[in-house]
Image (spheres, rainbow, N blue to C red):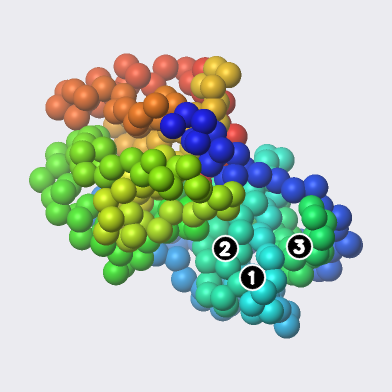
Amino acid sequence: MKKKFVKICTAISLTLAISLPILFGTGAIVVEASGFVPNNQGKLTLPVAAGTDVRQNAVSEIDFSHARYGYIMARWQGPATADVFLRIDGPDGIIYQYGLNPNGRWEVFPLTCGNGAYVIRILERVEGNRATVANSINLTVTLVDEFAPFLRPNQFVNFNADSRLVPLSTDLTARASGPLESVAIVYNWVVNNIEYDFELAETVQSGYVPDLDHVLYVRRGICFDYASLMTAMLRSQGIPTRLVIGFVGDVRHAWISVFTEETGWINDIIRFDGREWRLMDPTFSSTGGEAARRFVGDGQNHRPTHLH
């Protein structure tokens, strides 16, 4: 299982050596924050392509109307046979690369690198690792707050108001005393109800993206599905949740971090150790924030590479 998880994580963070022509639209567009009230637990926050700030051409469209809320949306409207992907260069220098579905539907991509200058590119692969820029935009983003990218769905943590996981999560956490107990409830439900799909792990291809409704229907999935499902279930309840891929020591690793007012960000609260998912402390939900704080530490051993 560890070998397959490394393969999946590599596919997530893959960056290509690409040959890029000069970008059009050299002026940076400033996106400012205004009038945001943080969501309470239990509130569903969904992206929308508002159409107020758009970079569009004959083959693609980038909607950055809500960049201040930690996401942009994009769609490909060119040939359905095109091999296209979206690349985000953030202010921290980290590159995020995602496949872009050529079916013309909007997809959501998070801006998880904080405030600053972003370059968003839609690229079309032409030969090998070479690609040409089909569309691009330079943005200067000021997020409404640090939680905005981690409350909403995106391509890797994909759900909507009709998703099976929304009423399931609501029912499961209805009697939870707070976010920490909700984390324990969601974790226990997922690991007790979703079986590991060994066949999929043997055949999974680079670019795999979880289909969470399908995962819930078949009750099977690989490590990426587990992480995405747990993150989506918590976000659907208004709990800021990061799906993190990085290293602990020298080991490729995934973990889920959550934020509560009592504890701040709790890193590694749910983690994958190369063999199985584990809850950091099975008793923390009953002992409250003080127990959780014991496990935060200084975070020096954690080296995140990508946040989703």
Q: SS at mark 1?
A: strand
**Residue 159, percent from left and from top:** 37, 61
Task: Report, in whole angstroms, how far the alpha carbon at label 3 lies from the one at label 2.
Answer: 21 Å
Marks 2 and 1: in contact by CB < 8 Å? Answer: yes
In the displayed structure, 28 sits above or below 179; it is below
Q: SS at mark 2?
A: strand
Amino acid type at circle 2 is Ile
**Residue 199, percent from left and from top:** 41, 45
Based on the displayed image, in which of its 4 quarters is residue 269 positioned? top left
Which residue occupies 19% across, 23% down?
Answer: 283
Amino acid type at circle 1 is Ile
Q: Nearer the viewer, mark 3 or mark 2?
A: 3
- Observer-nearest residue: 65 or 248? 248
Upstream in sequence: badge 3 or badge 2: 2
Upstream in sequence: badge 1 or badge 2: 1
Task: Judge the density around disc 2: few (<14), some (14-19), many (≥20) Cα neighbours within 10 Å.
Answer: many
Q: How many marks?
A: 3
Amino acid type at circle 3 is Arg
In this figure, which residue is indicated by the disc labeled 2? 72
In this figure, which residue is indicated by the disc labeled 1? 62
Which residue occupies 43% across, 54% down?
Answer: 210
In this figure, which residue is indicated by the disc labeled 3? 125
Which residue occupies 56% across, 50% down?
Answer: 205
Task: Judge the density around disc 1: few (<14), some (14-19), many (≥20) Cα neighbours within 10 Å.
Answer: many
Task: Report, in whole angstroms, how far the alpha carbon at label 1 lies from the one at label 2.
Answer: 7 Å
Q: Nearer the viewer, mark 3 or mark 1?
A: 3
